Image (cartoon, helix red, strand yellow):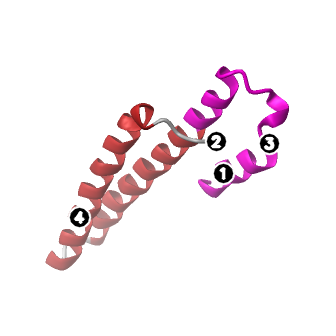
Amino acid sequence: MELVAAEMTPVINRIKRAQGQLAGVLRMLEEGRECEDVVTQLAAVSRALDRAGFAIVATGLQHCLTNGDEIDSVDVKKMEKLFLSLA
């Protein structure tokens, strides 16, 4: 399944925000910030990336199903593996 770049704009923006958050986590570590604060921010980065991954998979699946592709042509095992890789 090929992704349409124009449909990925929200995902790209989410990943860019996560990239900024991750830079913040690195800065916090370098500054010796409290463990709880660092872990909280790291968890936020992780959730943002997970959401981006789910959005990519969901968009790809929607694209396959709405463009006339038969459900049989969608590799169900491959889609399951993609979803589980994000779990």
Is residue 56 depicted above or below 86 in this figure?
A: above
Dividing the picture into quadrants, the one containing residue 71 is top right
Residue under label 3, please give it.
Answer: 76
Tell which of 25 and 17 is nearer to you: 17
Tell which of 45 and 75 is nearer to you: 75
Crowding near the residue tagged with mark 1, few <14, some 14–19, many ≥20 C-alpha atoms within 10 Å: some
Amino acid type of the residue tagged 1 in the rendering: Leu
Residue under label 2, please give it.
Answer: 1
Q: Residue at x 40, y 40 (%)?
A: 11
Crowding near the residue tagged with mark 4, few <14, some 14–19, many ≥20 C-alpha atoms within 10 Å: few
Residue 78 coordinates in the image, percent (x, y): 75, 50
Is residue 52 depicted above or below 46 in this figure?
A: above
13 vs 74, left or right, is left
Residue 48 coordinates in the image, percent (x, y): 40, 48
Is residue 28 depicted above or below 82 in this figure?
A: below
Asked if disc 2 and disc 4 are in contact, CB closer than 8 Å, the reply is: no
Q: Residue at x 67, y 30 (%)?
A: 64
Q: Give the CA distance from mark 1 to mark 4.
A: 27 Å
On residue 23, which mark appears? 4
Residues in magenta, as a range: 58-87
Name the front one of labels 2 and 4: 2
Residue under label 1, please give it.
Answer: 82
Name the front one of labels 3 and 2: 2
